[in-house]
Image: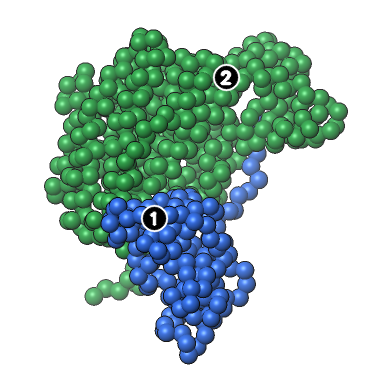
Amino acid sequence: MLVVNFSANGDGNCVVVEGRLFVLARTGKGSFLVRASCPHRGGPLHLADLDATGDTLVCPWHENGYPFTRSRESAIPVVRSANRVTAVFPSKSAASYTREYRPMSRCLSGQRPSGGSRSPRTGENPVAQRSGVLVPRADPDRMRSPVAPPP
Amino acid sequence: MMSEKHFPYPDVALSRDELRDAVVRYVSNPLYLDNEEWTNDDNPYRRQLRPQVVSHLDFSTVLRKEELLDYQSLTAQRLLTCIYEADLMFLPRADVAAKWQDFRRFYSPTNRVLSELVRPALERHAFGFLEGEVEVSGNWSRDSLEAYLRDGVSGKQEDPSESELAIEKSSDPQRAARMWLVQFAPDFLSEASPMIRNVLGSFGPLQSEWFKIIVDEYGYGVHDTKHSTLFEKTLESVGLRSDLHHYWLFYLTSSLMMNNYYHYLGKNHELFFRYLGALYYAESTLVPFCRRAADLLAKVFDGKIDTRYFTEHVHIDQHHGRMALDKLVLPAVEAYGDVVIPDIVRGFEEIQVLTALADEDFAAQIRWMDGGDDFKQLHGPVWAAIESGKVTAPMAPLLEPRGELSNTHCHDGDELCHIVSGTMRFVNGLDSYQILEAGEGTVIQKNRLHGAIIESEECRYEIHSVGDYQRCLS
């Protein structure tokens, strides 16, 4: 197996393993490894929106939808600690890989979505939609009262 | 079949006010009042918690990562240390009669009930940030876990840590090294106690494998070889005291956090598999760490230090690293399935987050101690900015009599201490201080541990909360 470290955000946030590009999608439903390019025509999935359910990537080129929470890529074991990501690929441990940079859409970079989520195109969308509500990552409860400084 | 709706089972949770009141009640135990000395004298029950400040703190939140070295966090970690250690057996070395009341108070039902009442909220407050800091996803298997863990410890801890570099670069390496040893005391003087929390019960072959590691840590029942005994010898060989929490007031937030994390995992048995991950990381990386520590300490003290604690770990942790993986972690997955893996991964990552924080915290404290004269010099321009009205900041005037000891604490922003009259000994670490006379003062850096004692009949001084002292200099 091939263990690869890369960044969640910023430089080196895209790992290329055996010619395939992967990024970590940080969404309100958790963080998952996803393909950075669309299998349809190679569109930039790292810039994808999420649909209303929050678990389907919508490619910005042709608006095809991909439910990443059930994809082959999201099954790859991955752990994020702060900005460091470690993924375990089923490739041979000696397989080569490189790291690159890809800009990420807001909704895949651990930030709240910028606005209304997009819907994938009907008809061309090969994937059945799942019901659900997009739940952005909640900030920790911050209810602090003014604190007197210790003397 | 009985329905759950007839027997509701809500979680126990205190409101913010209930929590604050319970914590205030807990810290009102006379054991936790301020001290009149910088150290505790062979009394394992005395731990200063500065109860006069606690009512101003809110433990109902989850601290963010950038708040982990703030005063709120220091207090939470001090509290948790007291709470966890009420499960451990401590006795003074001498004069038990004089400490009998303290002994009874520490293990009293009131202390223990109150500690259990506030513990879950304090744990959430202090360690809740880890939930967002570490995320695990994907379909893990035994093989992917093994590849990940082996890769995760390969080459780790080979280079000197920031703490070690800080000691080497320090203007007073021996003082810095003593401060370093003191940071290990909460863990090493009762070493493996958190692990023992998982010895009780019945969980098959894993239990016996877990116990084997503890047998080593406890020196096979031979007191002189018990790891905590070895560490006592290390402390004593460089002139430090080895009675428990003698240096309570000099523990950094992150040092307590590191030790408390293992208690947190051990006390809450639902986190057992996280403990496995954290244990594997610790046992695997201690070998290179202890090798470097032994070399560094021998160099700093010209060979006049007992380093057996560290050299013993260089040997035995080669076994413990292997045992933790081959006898505990992987058999756990084989026995209980992939469902346990995310927790193992989480523990493996979480302890690394805390280790990195502790490293940064200690190195910053050494720079703060070494820079004492520089921070004293900075009083001039910062005070000028305040006096001229260029900078306005909240100010607290204080008047204290001779011998008044401000027990160690830290601030959430930079402060200026300005002496109006009298003399103050400003202490910024173990054996590290500046004398401040009237008209003098010092910048107090955000998050840095410090305290003070008055050395004149009385001392009138002011604390100006400037936030960021650099803005006074521009």
Res B95 seen here: no
Task: Give SS at disc 1.
Answer: strand
The C terminus of chain B: image quadrant: top right
Q: Which residue is mark 1?
A: A97
Seen in the picture, residue B127 relative to B292 is either above or below; the reply is below
**How packed is label 2: few (under 14 Cα within 10 Å), some, or many (20 or more)?**
many
Judged from the image, the secondary structure of the residue bearing numbered disc 2 is: helix
Q: Amino acid at mark 2?
A: Asp
> Residue farthest to the right?
B388
Q: Chain of mark 1?
A: A
The residue located at (56%, 44%) in the rendering is: B66
Image quarter hosting the N terminus of chain B: bottom left
Horizontal placement of A5 versus A146: left or right? left
Determine the CA span between mark 2 and mark 1. 45 Å
- Residue at numbered disc 2: B370
Number of other residues with Cα within 10 Å of mark 1, as a class: few under 14, some 14 to 19, many 20 or more: some
- The chain letter for the residue carrying disc 2 is B
Q: Quadrant of residue B368?
A: top right
Residue B359: x percent and y percent? 46, 33
Q: Are marks 2 and 1 on the same chain?
A: no
Answer above or below: position of B366 versus A119: above
In the picture, measured across the screen, residue B441 lies left or right of residue A53, that is: right
Per the rendering, the colour in which chain A appears is: blue
Q: Residue placed at 30% from the left, 52% from the top?
A: A94
Left or right of B252? Residue B313 is left
Q: Amino acid at mark 1?
A: Tyr
Chain coloured green in the rendered structure: B
Residue at position x 24%, y 32% from top?
A: B317
Q: Is residue B187 visible?
A: yes
